[in-house]
């Protein structure tokens, strides 16, 4: 039998077992509820005793006094057998990483087998879990029931409120550590930047090449025009070049040739350097420049003033405040406002 066939067969067994267990748990809980009501004197004597006197006397004599023994011997035996069978299947199909994880994950099944009123209430959880499994397997659709939708809605609210409170407490603690601990700028450079210096330099150099290659061609003509303008103004202001213009006939030609030659050479050099910086074939150029800049940043950490370090701490603290404000937003309230017309609160 292939692994897929074994998995399909195991799912069919689990599905059949789930249906049977839902029925048995409902019967068990119904019997427990009936016995609890039977113990109430006014119900036993005034209601059951009036309409079903024979049954009432028989139940009080033979069942009620020994209900725990009967209920435990029948249902607890079934529940324990089902628990060990599921545990066996979980081990066979390696549902969990360790063989002993099953009773930990299904703690409510284990505690629900204890025959006391405090633990028998946990059998209600089994009903919800089994129903949810049938819903997940698309045997039933719990979304068709308003009670389920409302329970999920309040469950999401509870989870969000708890997770938000935990997140806010952690962020507040982080702010306190930032304020009273070592300047965060030094910590970031020492513990974050330095260990990943090469990776950061490679990443930054890649983006430098990409940015230059993407934007340079777009502004190439503007840069060339600007350089020609600057060079022309500089040459016209140069006294030595101005002397060439005094030469009869050839003066203007010589001056214009100098201007064009300087402009072409300057722009050619800049154009070649820029293309090399943007080229992946000559990545060592951009890598060297970015690495040098990164080294300057790391070295500058020791030269930061106290005020500069306080500024970095304050910037990070303000960023944490922004995150806290975002976390404290009640997303479930926004969802209620958006879906208020479609979600009818059964508790309102």
Image (spheres, rainbow, N blue to C red):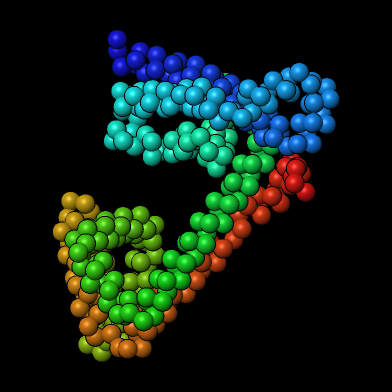
Which quarter of the picture shows residue 22? top right
Could you tell whether 74 is left or right of 276 in the image? right
Q: Is residue 288 left or right of residue 4?
A: left
Along the horizontal axis of the image, is 315 left or right of 202?
A: right
* Quarter residue 288 falls in: bottom left
Instruction: Name the foreground residue: 336 vs 166.
Output: 166
Q: Is residue 164 visible?
A: yes
Query: Which residue is pictured at 48% across the width and 19% down the height?
Result: 17
Residue 178: give x, y in percent of width and height. Answer: 37, 76
Total marks in image? 0
Q: Is residue 17 above or below residue 37?
A: above
Q: At x 46% / y 71%, what residue is drawn?
A: 172
- Residue drawn at point x = 25 percent, y = 75 percent: 297
Residue placed furthest toward the top: 1
Residue 277 in percent (x, y) is at 23, 60
Q: Position of residue 5 (x, y in %)?
A: 35, 13
| Location of the N terminus (image quadrant) | top left
Q: Nearer the viewer, residue 315 or 61?
A: 61
Against 283, residue 81 (above or below) is above
Quadrant of the rendered image containing residue 301 = bottom left
Say whether residue 141 is visible.
Answer: no
Q: Nearer the viewer, residue 37 or 56?
A: 56
Nearest the viewer among 11 and 178 is 11
Q: Position of residue 236 (x, y in %)?
A: 32, 83
Where is 293 relative to 71, above or below?
A: below
**294 vs 154: above or below:** below
Q: Residue at x 71, y 51 (%)?
A: 337
């Amino acid at each position: 039998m292939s692994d897929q066939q074994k998995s399909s067969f195991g799912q069919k067994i689990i599905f059949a077992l789930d249906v049977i267990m839902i029925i048995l748990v409902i019967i068990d809980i119904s019997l427990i509820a009936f016995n609890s009501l039977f113990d109430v004197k006014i119900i036993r004597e005034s209601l059951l005793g009036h309409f079903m006197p024979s049954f009432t006397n028989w139940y009080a004599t033979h069942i009620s006094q020994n209900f725990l023994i009967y209920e435990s011997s029948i249902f607890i035996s079934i529940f324990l057998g089902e628990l060990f069978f599921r545990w066996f299947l979980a081990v066979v199909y390696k549902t969990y990483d360790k063989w002993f994880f099953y009773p930990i994950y299904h703690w409510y099944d284990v505690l629900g087998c204890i025959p006391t009123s405090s633990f028998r209430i946990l059998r209600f959880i089994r009903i919800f879990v089994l129903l949810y499994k049938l819903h997940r397997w698309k045997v039933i659709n719990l979304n068709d029931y308003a009670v389920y939708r409302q329970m999920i809605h309040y469950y999401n609210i509870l989870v969000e409120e708890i997770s938000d409170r935990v997140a806010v407490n952690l962020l507040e603690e982080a702010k306190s550590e930032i304020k009273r601990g070592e300047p965060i700028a030094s910590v970031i450079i020492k513990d974050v930047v330095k260990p990943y210096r090469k990776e950061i330099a490679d990443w930054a150099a890649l983006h430098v090449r990409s940015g230059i290659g993407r934007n340079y061609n777009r502004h190439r003509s503007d840069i060339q025009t600007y350089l020609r303008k600057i060079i022309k103004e500089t040459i016209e202001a140069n006294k030595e070049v101005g002397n060439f213009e005094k030469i009869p006939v050839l003066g203007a030609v010589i001056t214009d040739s100098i201007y064009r030659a300087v402009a072409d050479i300057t722009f050619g050099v800049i154009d070649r350097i820029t293309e090399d910086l943007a080229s992946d074939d000559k990545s060592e150029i951009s890598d060297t420049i970015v690495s040098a800049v990164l080294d300057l940043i790391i070295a500058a950490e020791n030269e930061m003033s106290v005020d500069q370090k306080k500024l970095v701490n304050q910037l990070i603290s303000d960023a944490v405040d922004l995150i806290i404000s975002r976390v404290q937003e009640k997303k479930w309230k926004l969802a209620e406002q958006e879906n208020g017309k479609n979600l009818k609160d059964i508790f309102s």
